Image (tube, rainbow, N blue to C red):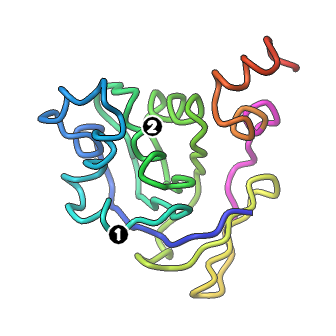
Amino acid sequence: MLTGRAFKFGDNISTDQIIPGRFAHLRSNLPELAKHAMEDAAPTFVARVKPGDFIVAGSNFGLGSSREHAPLVIKMAGVKAILARSVARIFFRNAINVGLPVLLCHTDNINDGDELEVDLKAGTIRDITSGSQLTFSKIPEIMLHILDEGGLLPYLEKYGDFKL
């Protein structure tokens, strides 16, 4: 069970907003790059986010260039999962590869600051603040295993192959 606060964003949050291009020189220093996660979408995000919190977004989260570090710096900032109406396919795959769950669901009724409880296996989100409950598309078993191990590389290091 994951619990944390919602940080609400709108539609079309690009990888340029997640990792501004002016910080590209920090790609080899991920802890420093993570200090700038979401800076162009919400300048105080890194100062306010706590381990276990969630990004809640509208449609088309993570669009733009692949910037494989984008989901990684979000995770390094403390975010436990991203809830969005839709995400760019390459962002989705990169997020799973680094062990960051991306949950596709209706996010309109989740407000900034709401306390959420997410059950990855059951496919449910409980908004503790409002008392409402949402569902998201079930995560395939293999992806749950990858997420449990912290990403694709740790999974492959442990198992050496996919156990389908």
Are dots 2 and 1 in contact, CB under 8 Å? no
Left or right: where 68 falls relative to 156:
left
Q: Which amino acid, mark 2?
A: Leu
Within 10 Å of the Cα at label 1, are there few (<14), some (14-19), or many (20+) other Cα atoms? few
Task: Establish if 156 lies above or below 142.
Answer: above
| Chain-order first, disc 2 or disc 1 | 1
Q: Which image quadrant: the C terminus?
A: top right
Considering the numbered disc 1 on the image, is that residue within a helix, a strand or a loop? helix
Task: Establish if 7 lies above or below 90.
Answer: below
Task: Establish if 88 lies above or below 4.
Answer: above
Residue 140 highlighted magenta (yes or no): yes
107 or 92, which is in the foreground? 92
Spot the residue most to the top. Answer: 160
Distance, label 2 to label 1, CA atoms, is 18 Å
Report the residue marked by disc 2.
72
Residue 112's label in the rendered image is none
Location of residue 107 in the rendering, given as x and y in whole percent from the top left corner: 50, 65
Left or right: where 156 falls relative to 56:
right
Residue 97 highlighted magenta (yes or no): no
In terms of image quadrants, where is residue 160? Answer: top right
Report the residue marked by disc 1.
48
Location of residue 46 in the rendering, given as x and y in whole percent from the top left corner: 32, 59
Spot the residue most to the left. Answer: 22
51 or 163, which is in the foreground? 51
Q: Which amino acid, mark 1?
A: Arg
Magenta region: 135-144
Q: Which image quadrant: the N terminus?
A: bottom right
